[in-house]
Structure formats: C-alpha cells, structure tokens
Amino acid sequence: MFRKTSVNSEEFIFYIDLTTEFLKKKSLSKCISSFIKDKEKFNTLSSYGILLFQEDDNPITVYDAKDFEALSDILDEKWETRDTEKSLFENGLFEILAYIFRKSREARKNYRVIIISDTPSLLSEDYHNALYDLLIKAKKFDVFIDIIRLGDQKFYADDVKLKVVSSETHGGVFYCTEAKLFLNILKSLIQSKSEFIVVQPEEDDQIFKED
C-alpha cells in the first residue's frame, strides 16, 4: 500500500544517470518539457530540479525551479561533458537526499525523485549500505523515488538494488526497452503514487523524430 498525504506542493527532481546514447539529449529534453507542461495542468504548486554528473565526478544541480528553462540550460550546457564512463547512482542519491533533508526543515512538500538510468552502478557494497541507511531515514519525509531503466537487456546486475531503492520509498522501477516508450513511462508518473498506467505511444512519437 502507498502512503497517503494531503500535501499539495511537489518538487520533481530528475536524476540524469545516462552514459549511452540510447536516449538522445534532444528527446530527453523534449520529454521532460512535455512532462512539466502536463503536470502544470494538474498542480501549479510543482517545482523542478535536475542532477547530472560531469566527467570529474562533480554533480551539477538545480533545485526548486519553477519552470523547464533552468533544467533546459543544464542539459544544453553540461550534456557533452557528462560522465559517460560509469554510473554514480548512489552518489547522486546521497546528494539529492541531503538536499531533501535540508529543505524539509523549511517547508513540507512531496519530493518526487525520478532517476533516468541506462547503466548499473559498479560502486562497492559499502555505498549501497550507506544509501539504504539514508532511505530508512527518508521514510520520515514525503520522498518517493521512481526509476526508469533504459536499455534492451533482459536482466541487469543492479535489478535487485533498484527494486529495494524504489520499494523503500513507495516508488517503482520501469524498464524502457525502446526510446519511443520513454515519454509514456515518464508521463505515467504525473499521476498519484497509488496507480501507474503506461499507455502505448501514439501522437507523442514525433518527439523522437530528428529534424
């Protein structure tokens, strides 16, 4: 069962953990923009953030932005210098959860973390254990973590880890085997956490057509 909350204010944080070209930057940007436009129809109290690691393992972040422009600037300026050698899955969540814990002291709202990942993390078990301890702490806050795994593999080395992270925070893991399915999976997360519906791609397919 998913927990219920009367909190109307939400902050969506997109954690971009992409090392391959399975999903192009142009498509990713358009999909996030479309998500935000649709979300604004249902809740005008939403804000948005983004995290993207650079080649030097430095996380670039924007939090609590009111529109897509701030996120778009990060994608445009930092995409080519992102880390394409490895996933720093745990480190990114350390950063995001630290922000949420700080911010929650100021005002209560729902924090919806959406991780978009195409590569399993190879960090040691110590990192995972430290992350799990933080996830237990996160239960005291209104934190929901959903993970979209991009790629055409049937199994991944971190499948169990992803399920633990999402289940501990009342989220879900979604496997996107084709780039054209990404928008529909992403938009399913606009809904309340009590229900997930993934529809088949129709009119939004043009987003993935290159100019």
Image: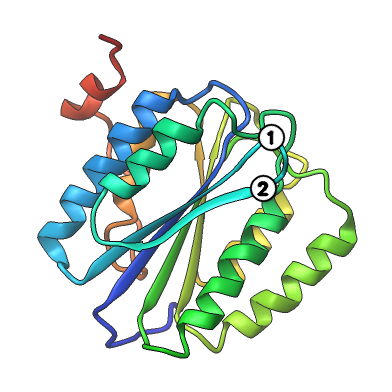
Dot 2 crowding, Cα within 10 Å, few <14, some 14–19, many 20+: few
User: Which structural element holds mark 1?
Assistant: loop
The percent coordinates of residue 6 (x first, y second) are: 27, 88
Residue 21 quadrant: top right
Nearer to the camera, 192 or 67: 67
Residue hosting label 2: 58
User: Which structural element holds mark 2?
Assistant: loop
Residue located 65% across and 75% down the image: 135
Q: Is residue 36 left or right of residue 125?
A: left
Dot 1 crowding, Cα within 10 Å, few <14, some 14–19, many 20+: some
Nearer to the camera, 201 or 146: 146
Residue 167 quadrant: bottom right
Residue 49 visible (yes or no): yes
Amino acid type of the residue tagged 1 in the rendering? Glu
Quadrant occupied by the C terminus: top left
The percent coordinates of residue 203 (x first, y second) are: 16, 27
User: Where 47 falls versus 87 (above or below)?
Assistant: below
Q: Check whether the beta carbons of the residues at disc 2 and disc 1 lie within 8 A of each other.
A: no
User: Where 110 falls versus 131 (above or below)?
Assistant: below
The percent coordinates of residue 207 (x first, y second) are: 25, 24
How far is the residue under mark 2 from the one under mark 1?
Answer: 7 Å
Residue 197 visible (yes or no): no
Residue hosting label 1: 55
Amino acid type of the residue tagged 2 in the rendering? Asn
Residue located 42% across and 71% down the image: 111
Q: Is residue 112 left or right of residue 210?
A: right
Residue located 65% across and 84% down the image: 137
The percent coordinates of residue 46 (x first, y second) are: 25, 67
